[in-house]
Amino acid sequence: MDLLSAFQVVAGLILLVAGGEGLVRGASGLALRFGLSPLVVGLTVVAFATSAPELAVSLDAVLAGEPDLAVGNVIGSNIANILLVLGVSALVAPLVVTAQVVRIDLPFMVVLTIALYLLARDGSIAGADGPALLLALLGYLVLAVVLGRRSARASGSQAEAPTAGLPHEALDGVSSAPAAPEPEGTSRQDRGWRLLVDVVLVAAGVGLLVVGAGQLVDGATRIAEALGVSGLVIGLTVVAVGTSMPELATSIVAVRRNQRDLALGNVVGSNIFNIGLVLGLPATVTAGTGGIPVPATALALELPVAIAAAVALLPVALSRRGMPRWKGGAFVVLYATYLTVVVLTSTEHAALSTVTRVAMTIVVPLIALALVAPVVVDVHRDWQDRRGVRNVTG
């Protein structure tokens, strides 16, 4: 391991933090200018921006004749976004799940992830698969913006109603409605200047995120190679985590700035962009040459884990408590378990069977029970509340 690689890792982290700060500031300002909630901006503008490293890596990999890296990058990044990025963000500050995420965004992400698995079962993403993914993304974006603006107009200055009866005080100042309008008397020139500043912040933030992610991935890859780690493990771990660093940096900054709905929207939207755009565009470009082949290992392990991670968010969304710190810790444990299995599988380590058996019989069931149990309790309480109301009115 040389000093240059270590410097690249440190410089990449610094650029990611700076880029995340600029992107969140600019995106929040744009939400104010165009009457959109931070959630919608997170699902669209910020999600697209933080998916830029995945898009760059996947396009470069496909054009360079390494399609396995493109598929592994997207699937690995989606898993990291849910288990690692959301997990760490919740450890920083509990996350609140808003109603639109439950009704539209999260179900769409789950359906799109399952659809990707079904499209890839024949061993490739080819033919009409790429255009279908792009059209699905376009339809989702239109729906998200229309519903977001409608919700903003209906709620005015009030925050969107929290999900599943979550009390308003749990929001802790977080609002899914657009921020308060600018003071009267603000000149058109001032508004135009502030809009330009927001756009520059978003553009600069995206640039810093892309450069920072590139430096981090390059430096970490060199360190991993120096330690004798295989290329497969590097692709499934270092590259996937590295290209998820913009989501992590942006989400942590958003949480610290009390824009927790933007943090969640960033992750859900980024996963949707990763499948619809980052895989859909290269598959469309290479449709005439057979599309993007999907490795058998991805169908056997990575894609099922991606589906399971997406489904694991459903109990979180349906719970009154949103995503407290202990759930974030559970997600991080799941991600660490997944990485351990990936490394042991790629190296054919003798401990693989033991680790897999412990994970499937102890770790996963216990965490699944912990995630589902609060939802069952909430449903029971809601049923008792409704029964009590009926008895009083009757």
Image (spheres, helix red, strand yellow):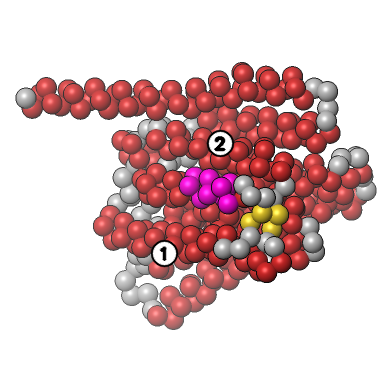
Tell me how many marks there are: 2
Q: Which range is magenta?
A: 110-119
Residue visible at 50% across and 37% down? 311
Residue visible at 31% across and 35% down? 165
Going from the N terminus, do you reach mark 2 or mark 1 first? Answer: 1
Task: Give the numbered dot on residue 308.
Answer: 2
The quarter of the displayed image where residue 173 is located: top left
Residue 65, magenta (yes or no): no
Q: Name the spot of residue 142 as percent of width and height, x first.
A: 41, 64
Q: Nearer the viewer, mark 2 or mark 1?
A: 2
**Closest to the observer, 310 or 28:** 310
Residue 114, magenta (yes or no): yes
Q: Are marks 2 and 1 in contact (CB under 8 Å)?
A: no
Q: Horizontally, is 73 left or right of 270 in the view?
A: right
Q: Residues within 10 Å of mark 2 (few under 14, many from 20)?
A: some
The quarter of the displayed image where residue 197 is located: bottom right
User: Which residue position is annotated with label 1?
Assistant: 142
* Screen quadrant of the C terminus: top left
Q: Name the spot of residue 212 as percent of width and height, x first.
A: 73, 57
**Closest to the observer, 237 or 66:** 66
Whether residue 128 is visible to the viewer of this picture, yes or no, is yes
Residue visible at 43% across and 23% down? 373
- Compute the Cα span from label 2 to label 1: 27 Å
**Closest to the observer, 53 or 308:** 308
Whether residue 81 is visible to the viewer of this picture, yes or no, is no
* Screen quadrant of the N terminus: top right
Task: Identify residue type, mark 1.
Answer: Val
Q: Name the spot of residue 41 as percent of width and height, x first.
A: 47, 59
Residue visible at 71% across and 66% down? 289
Depicted 203 relative to depicted 144: above or below: below
Q: Secondary structure at mark 1?
A: helix
Q: Horizontally, is 195 left or right of 348 in the view?
A: left
